[in-house]
Image (tube, rainbow, N blue to C red):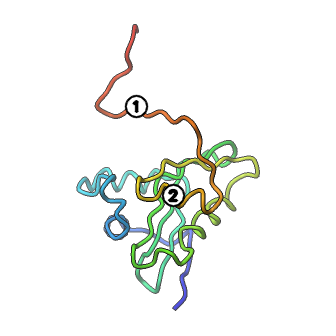
């Protein structure tokens, strides 16, 4: 059976959490916070999914303006389906829906860092994160 890709197929929160767990991305996502997961899906600007029959086997969830930048927040592929080009196709389909000058940006999971250069992404020398439990330092 072949893999079907979609940008319009409804994605339930339980399906999303399940594929996050099967991809190991759940280690870095709030899978035990259903409200946060629901908001993540509801507020994404672009979601591309990969299905084998009725089973979700991959997802690319992005926040974007479609013109200047696209943050590919989640790229998850079921571990049993990795190595078949699903992640590459999810990125390709995401990229195809963006404007011609739009940059695709992502933060690599530690175990996936070697994958991205292999498919053509370039490492950027700086990325900065302000975690939710920390405030801005300095004078107000």
Snapshot quadrant of residue 90: bottom right
Q: Position of residue 39 (x, y in %)?
A: 37, 51
Snapshot quadrant of residue 19: bottom left
The answer to whether 17 is drawn above or below residue 65 in the figure is below
The circle drawn on residue 114 is 2
Give the mark, 1 or 2, whose residue is nearer the N terminus.
Answer: 2
Number of numbered labels in the structure image: 2
Q: Position of residue 105 (x, y in %)?
A: 58, 47
Q: Is residue 121 left or right of residue 72?
A: right
Secondary structure, mark 1, is: loop
Q: Is residue 95 left or right of residue 45?
A: right
Secondary structure, mark 2, is: loop
Q: Nearer the viewer, residue 53 or 58?
A: 58
Q: Could you tell me which quadrant the C terminus lies in?
A: top left
For image coordinates 43% across by 68% down, the residue present is 11
The furthest residue to the top = 139
The answer to whether 130 is drawn above or below residue 25 in the figure is above
Q: Residues within 10 Å of mark 2 (few under 14, many from 20)?
A: few
The circle drawn on residue 130 is 1
The furthest residue to the left = 32
The furthest residue to the right = 100
Q: Position of residue 24 (x, y in %)?
A: 34, 64
The answer to whether 55 is drawn above or below residue 48 in the figure is below
The circle drawn on residue 86 is none
Q: Residues within 10 Å of mark 1 (few under 14, many from 20)?
A: few
User: Is the residue under label 2 in contact with that under label 1 (CB below 8 Å)?
Assistant: no
Q: Position of residue 36 (x, y in %)?
A: 32, 50
Q: Is residue 2 left or right of residue 139?
A: right
For image coordinates 49% across by 58% down, the residue present is 61
């Amino acid at each position: 059976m072949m893999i079907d890709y979609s940008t319009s197929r409804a994605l339930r929160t339980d399906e999303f959490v399940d594929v996050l767990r099967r991809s190991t991305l759940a280690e870095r996502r709030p899978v035990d916070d259903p409200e946060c997961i629901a908001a993540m899906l509801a507020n994404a600007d672009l979601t591309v999914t990969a299905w084998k029959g009725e089973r979700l086997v991959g997802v690319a969830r992005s926040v974007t303006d479609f013109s200047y930048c696209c943050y590919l927040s989640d790229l998850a592929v079921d571990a049993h389906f990795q190595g078949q080009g699903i992640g590459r196709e999810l990125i390709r389909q995401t990229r195809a829906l963006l404007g011609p000058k739009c940059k695709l940006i992502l933060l690599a999971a530690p175990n996936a860092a070697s994958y991205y250069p292999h498919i053509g992404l370039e490492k950027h020398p700086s990325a900065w994160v302000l975690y939710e439990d920390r405030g801005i330092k300095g004078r107000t």
